[in-house]
Image (cartoon, coloured by chain):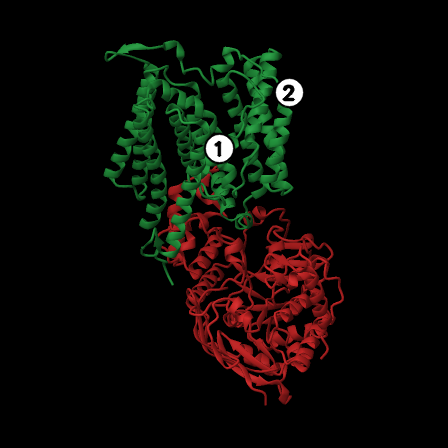
Chain colours: A red, B green
Amino acid sequence: MSQTILRMNSITKEFPGVKALDNVNISVNEGEIHAIVGENGAGKSTLMNVLSGVYPHGNYQGEIIYAGEQCQFRSMKDSEKKGIVIIHQELALVPYLSIAENMFLGNEQGSPWKIDWDETNKKSTEYMKVVGLHENPRTLIKDIGMGKQQLVEIAKALAKDVKLLILDEPTSSLNESDAKKLLDLLIHFKQEKGITSILISHKLNEIAYCADKITIIRDGQSIETLDNNQGDVTEERIIRGMVGRELKNRYPQREHQIGDVGFEIKDWTVYHPQYGDRKVVDHVSLKVHHGEVVGIAGLIGAGRTELAMSVFGRAYGSRISGSLYKDGQERHYGSISDAIADGLAYVTEDRKGNGIILSNSVKHNLSLARPEFISHRGILDKDKETQLTKEYREKLSIKASSVEQQVDNLSGGNQQKVLVGKWIFAQPDVLLMDEPTRGVDVGAKYEIYQIINELIAQGKSVIMISSELPELLGMCDRIYVMNESRVIAEFARGSVSQEDIMASIMKDSKGEISA
Amino acid sequence: MKTNTLKTNLRQYTMMLMLVIIIIFFQVLTGGRLLLPMNVNNLVNQNAYVVILAVGMLICILTGGNIDLSVGSVVCLVSAFAGQMIIVMKWNPYLSILLCLLIGALLGVWQGFWIAYIKIPAFIVTLSGMLVFRGLALLILNGLTLAPFPDAFKQFSTGSFLSGVGKVPLMGMELNPVSLISGVLIVVVYWAYTLLTRASKKRKGYQVEGTLPLLVKLAIISLVVIGFFYILSKWRGVPSVLIIIGLLLLVYSYLTTNTVMGRHIYAIGGNEKAARLSGVKTNKLIFLAYVNMGFLAGLAGLAFAGRVDSAYPGAGQSFELDAIGACYVGGASAYGGVGTVGGALVGALIFGILNNGMSLMGINSNLQQVVKGLVLLGAVAFDVVGKMNIASGFRLGRKIKPTIVIGK
């Protein structure tokens, strides 16, 4: 048995209001491919950021023992010196620099005052040969495909004399053959060069294909490590480990009184706004009744956000086709304000990016979507605004010193409540909620669920997109599953388990790679 | 609530305090010449165009840190049009003024189109405009200066309000009654407005500010206003351009703080994507911000042409920098979403008094530029460092308590 190269002991990492990692232990042997799996937000990427020094020592608790010594990395530079290289999900390549320049970025050949370009190009050609890439080192990164870019990243890691390679979802944007090539390369490195790899992936078939060990992380805790070489690790076994938490009153009770169809999407197709031939929503039909929460499950990139945003007054996409019905009547929304005026609301998944305005006060954020409620012919009634937003602040128990407080001084959970509050202020009939509890702690989650239940009690319709399956199972009356731009399954409440949903996605994605 | 309002108010007060200090500083150093009636009159006339431009610039900056580099060239082009129409072609001055304002707005339409709908960065579009508009102005003027303008045209820029009244002996001095009455009237209207809104708020059961701070505020503002108009009354009375500026400031403060449109402009600057997803017509508003800027730059062009009594090829050079600088000194954020009309006014006044005071002291004009540049950097650095300190709980070398984050 080979020896342990890396041991991370009781790692705990807290963000304001959220415990991202809670006493995580992991041990990796030299020369193995070690997979880390878990749901979105389970803490996989955080763990790797701790390991690679993105979060410097002192920012987390616990110890890292690598190659027999205790390590206290202060930056990525420190961990790279030891041969630990991380390749992030979003590639860190500069599009307008050449392959060779990218490969040696931060590791330039020659002296700081005179880069040796001949050496750079020669070496990059050698490394490209190792990863099986046949390109001119002077080719610009933007001119090669995603699969090849991924190989450049790996070559870049090799150029840094990598001993432990960390790959965060390396195949998420690759097609089947490129993904297989990449995994074969990892196996090749393991056998020929003794390079250890840590692989973070959602694709269980890939993990089954190449991993030696599998560590499961759930809710910021390391649950178990399975040995894939024993041959008895099935995908079902991994899924059970990933989602297998007990639900004990994490979701408030409500009465299920479902009325008529409130909103219906029929045959909805959307193309990517920049890449006009890429379908991001493919003939999707779904409906939601009054007093009903309908969930949409699926992996990141399945087309859920694109669906919701394109419905919401064409906020996203091009060449949109299909039809929308509200209370049985067909609607055409030419703009976002049309959709809002007709009683639609979209709670974005990206709170800070396109949800709230950090530099504005709580009250200005709350009233932003429906200024007509606090104004007359375009003139604001500020007293009424203060009055109304105060009521909403209390109703939603937003913990702010007053409605005048700027939202960037609020905690994440309270910012999320402001975002949800903005749309409740708008008094919609149909709410499209995209990851409504992302990045908030358990307590704030519960409060948001209660808000949703109150809306339902008023007979409103809610479509909830979430990557957290327990949340969908706990809150929804029905769940649609989306994968690769299509709705692939529909489950009713009570008759479905997390395993069923995961299995339906896995089954649909099968054939992406043949093990 | 306390910390937050205090923090924002503190910033405004800091700017005003800076203005007061600069006024006292130059008043002392120039041996009292700064606040002589003639010089105050000059200050108003000299800085009218900067204030007008700064108000327009503020709106552009609010929409997301978009600046307009072309305003100096628009000033030149519009004044060239005015010269051509009024001096060369002998058109009716009033008709020409309307046409010139329209031309300014059309130049704004041109730039707004590229910025808002084609999404070319404002910096580039207006840099292009800076070259194009000045070039066109030179073509119209053929490199020559057109002068002089008829009095009917100049009365808006250098004349006085109801100038026929003249001065009357009052309290043993020769004073202009129009100016005195204007000052008193403004104070009365201000008191009435403040007290009436306060009463109405109270009636509806809303929170109102305390009586004592209110009275102090009213007293200070009344004194400043009366003092200012008293000084003006000792010279030629109320400059006409002051009325134009006053109206502009009123309209634009109201627009930015009390209308849905104003609220939306701040929202765009704070987070354009969030504003768009909340139903704000972001492109349309950015477009309108530039149309408005063009219109106001046209107005500034007319005011400037009237003041220098000519249209000449070098008009408006580096005006854009004064206007942009005034906004930033006045507390506008370089990233948009933060800033007030009042702040832009204070910024413009700080620049104006620096210019005027240093000129009175006979300081070399090259050195004046150095001082202005350093004041701009200093004012913004003060602001940025202040924010950083709050974020890290550290202020000018000594620890302060970090601002309390409410909730978990």
In percent of width and height, residue B113 lies at: 63, 37
**Residue A240 x/y as whole percent:** 56, 81
For residue A179, above or below residue B233: below
Q: Is A333 situated above or below B35?
A: below
Tell me the element at label 1. helix
Disc 2 residue type (three-letter): Ile
Q: Chain of mark 2?
A: B
Circle nearer the N terminus (2, 1): 2
Marks 2 & 1, CB-CB < 8 Å contact: no
Q: A484 or B310: which is nearer to us?
A: B310
Q: Position of residue B307 (x, y in %)?
A: 48, 18
Circle count: 2
User: Image check: A210 left or right of A372?
Assistant: right
Three-letter amino acid code of the residue under disc 1:
Ala
Question: How far, Cα to Cα, is label 2 from label 1?
Answer: 25 Å
Question: Quadrant location of residue A190?
Answer: bottom right
Answer left or right for B239 relative to B289: left
Instruction: Give the side of residue A329 with respect to residue A435, left or right.
Output: right
Which sits in the foreground, A405 or A287? A405
Quadrant of the rendering where the C terminus of chain B is positioned: bottom left
Q: Which mark is residue B140?
A: 2
Tag 2 secondary structure: helix
| Tag 1 residue | B323
Q: In the image, residue A64 lies at what x, y percent?
A: 48, 77
Report the residue at 32% width, 31% height from top. Answer: B25
Give a yes or no on whether discs 2 and 1 share a subunit: yes
